[in-house]
Image: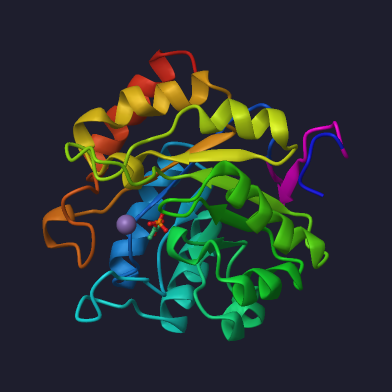
Amino acid sequence: LVSRKKKNSDTVIDLGGTRVGTGRPHVIAGPCAVESEEQVFAVARALKAQGIEIMRGGAFKPRTSPYDFQGLGLEGLKILRKAADEFGLKVISEIVNPADIEVAGEYIDVIQIGARNMQNFELLKAAGSVNTPVLLKRGLSATLEEFLFAAEYIMSRGNDQVMLCERGIRTYEKWTRNTLDISAVPILKNESHLPVFVDITHSTGRRDILLPCAKAALAAGADGIMLEVHPNPAVALSDAKQQIDIPSFDHFMGELRASGLFE
Ligand code: PEP
Ligand code: MN
């Protein structure tokens, strides 16, 4: 179902007027984790000012350590919805438990399945059983074949609104958090008809190379990029070292537009 051999036209996903996969790229931005209403509203206001249509924010956080901030849960989804409605944005958030998939559809426009859950088959099947669009991230060390089979799990249950997201893979390199596999973009676009995004924040873990990686992703044919923006990254409850503040985001967007790769 994911294969371009079966369907040769690009899949376009309509998020209530925001159309993904049309050839015009999207930026998905927002904090790593939802921390408070004030924090999310500050980011939403900044996105609106930049003409960005899709906001991200984690409510259920799949943290490496069980002692780290685990997210606000359902309360976080409610904050995202409130901010999205206030500023006319679409919102995406990660769901980690199959039992939460259905209720998530009441609050968010796109369900994110994170890298750590790419092969959580019960979660994939649950996401396949609802009508909410899904953004599936590539596993930490998943091959592209495994990635597409994970998308197939969702589609085989009836949900054909799936977006793929390259977010870097594990290699021996230590100067980036993960290694951004830019070749994944044209390969996934050739093999599949689904929209492809690149998460430039989690793939690099470095603020100083976000812009060239964003340009590379769009030049390679990505349908959009994702990045983390926080009003005050220094006090962020997760990923403090990699999120950018709002003035940096405004600067980033200015440079991206000047490159001609984003309108
Ligand atoms: C995220 O986008 O919030 C996240 C945790 O990313 P990943 O699943 O790619 O690590
Ligand atoms: Mn993060």
Query: Residue at image x 48%, y 13%?
Result: 260
Is 177 placed left or right of 16 in the picture? left
Q: Quadrant of residue 25?
A: top right
| Front position in the image: 232 or 204 | 204
- Residue 23 higher or lower than 241, as above or below: above
Q: How many marks?
A: 0
Point out the residue furthest to the bottom here. 99
Residue 146's spot in the image, x, y percent?
A: 59, 51
Q: Is residue 18 magenta?
A: yes
Residue drawn at x 19%, y 81% as measured from the top left: 67
Q: Out of 225 and 165, give the one closest to the viewer.
A: 165
Q: Does residue 78 appear anywhere in the picture?
A: yes
> Residue at position x 36%, y 61% from top?
41
Most common SS among magenta residues: loop
Q: Would residue 37 be found to the left or right of residue 128 on screen?
A: left
Magenta-drawn segment: 6-19
Where 140 falls versus 179 (above or below)?
below
* Quarter where residue 4 is shown: top right
Using the rendered view, name the quadrant where residue 175 is placed. Answer: top left
At a point 71% along the width and 62% down the height, the residue shown is: 153
Image location of residue 164, percent across then percent down = 59, 46
Horizontal and vertical percent position of residue 201: 33, 43
Q: Is residue 82 magenta?
A: no
> Viewed as shown, does residue 3 lie left or right of 7?
left
Colour scheme shown? rainbow
Q: Residue furthest left?
A: 234
Name the quarter showing ligand 2. bottom left
On the question of residue 262 being in view, the answer is: no
Instruction: Classify 84 as above or below 27.
Output: below
Instruction: Please tell me which residue lies in front, 110 or 55.
Output: 110
How far across and how far down the image is residue 77, in percent? 48, 74
